[in-house]
Image (tube, rainbow, N blue to C red):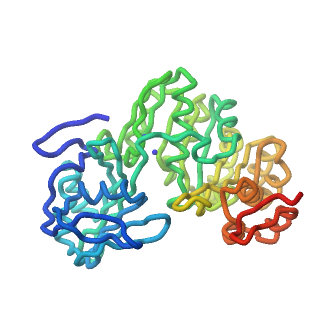
Amino acid sequence: MIHRVWHPPRRVNHRRDAGATDGCSSRLHLELSGGRFEPMAGPVSIHQLLGAMKTTGASDLHLKAGLPPTYRVGGHLRAVKMPPMTGEEIDACLTPIIPPTRRSYYDEHGDLDFSCDLPDGDRFRVNIFRAGTKMNAAIRRVNSVIPSYEQLHLPPIYGQLIDRSNDGIIIVAGVTGSGKSTTLAAMIEHINSTRSENIVTIEDPVEFVFKPKKSIISQREIGIDISNYGEGLKYIVRQDPDTIFIGEMRDKFTMTAALQAAETGHLVFGSLHSADAMQAFSRILEFFPRAEHEFVRGALANALRGICVQRLLPGTTEGALVPATEVLLNTSTCKDIIRKEQDQDIPALIAGSEKEGMHSFTSSLARLVQSELVYMDVAMQYAPNPDALASTLRGIKTTASTMISRTR
């Protein structure tokens, strides 16, 4: 969420160029037809498999031993009509884009994250993993252009929160695949475009590549520039940063480093796996022994600026995914809740603080329906409390196609 290029023969970049010819022997030209990818003449390569993600609008590519390549298009999995790939064939296809310095890590641990680029600028986040002794992969396409809040359909409070924060910590939370990295990239790009600051990021892997505008940016990738988060965070404050982006706050060390940096005058951004704002606190506290919870709560009460949680759901435009959001701002009341371990009061605080800029998933879903970005039935399906959403949407009616129109 977030470069340097080297050119060995027919391979490019530690992040890697996917244009090199791979070791697959099958032949295939990818074309979307009737919900299936039809085979035609042409050599199969990782370059072609990745390039087809752009032409078909696929968000993800799955390579599983014993199955043909499978794409996720508009939220649905669609397989290429070709013979299943073996683990050895997958290994041969992926070898050209695996950073040579990191192959040994996969061999030892059975899992590896990295990023790669196509010559046309398209970028991909790659996770290879061992399952049943065979290599498998999950590859996600990363937009080469960093989108704005408006393009992501994020509420104005996202930008307002950053504009009024010069220090502290801002957390973007959500489940896997909820668009956290893209939202964080939009936040960092907002600072890059509006402030004269030194931004340092630590990512695993780097996804969005920033071009310095008003700010200067140093993007450090785990396994390429530094060996782990601990190494990157240990001396990060010595690099004179104004803004720090930590790709994922995943353990006690990264969370402690984030809080310490936030408390010493830096603005820190990080992602967290959590379904909602209330759960975010229990998730953070899980990193620490019970004896340290009071200290951690005190640090959070002082340093936290806001928690922005999101979930992606199908939009009214075919293939589109739209974020439903929940925003918690660290007001004086919120500080008391954090310190007093009254996390159960957070949903009520959010629901009653819309004038301050907070909002719940329910109110976010209602706005998405009213803006015709999401169908009514989809909103109900994703609503944490369908009855509350129905009450909020009273006065709104759906057409036969479930599109909404205002009752006059």
Residue name at image x 59 percent, y 63 percent? 314
Residue 295: image x %, image y %? 66, 47
Question: Looking at the image, which residue is at 28% across and 34% down?
Answer: 4
Image coords of residue 401 (percent x, y)? 68, 70
Quarter-of-image position of residue 12: top left
The quadrant in which the C terminus is found is bottom right
Residue situated in front as seen by the camera: 41 or 366: 41
Q: From what the image shows, is residue 14 above or below residue 293? A: above
Residue closest to the eye, 389 or 256: 389
Percent x, y of residue 90: 22, 67
Report if residue 26 is visible in the image. Answer: yes
Q: Is residue 309 left or right of residue 121?
A: right
Residue at point 71%, 49% (across, down):
327
Q: Quadrant of residue 298?
A: top right
Q: Residue furthest left?
A: 9
**Callout count:** 0
Q: Position of residue 191 (x, y in %)?
A: 56, 30
Is any part of residue 64 visible from this angle?
no
In this view, 406 is above or below 205: below
28 vs 243, left or right, is left
Q: Residue at x 31, y 72 (%)?
A: 80
Image quarter of residue 93: bottom left
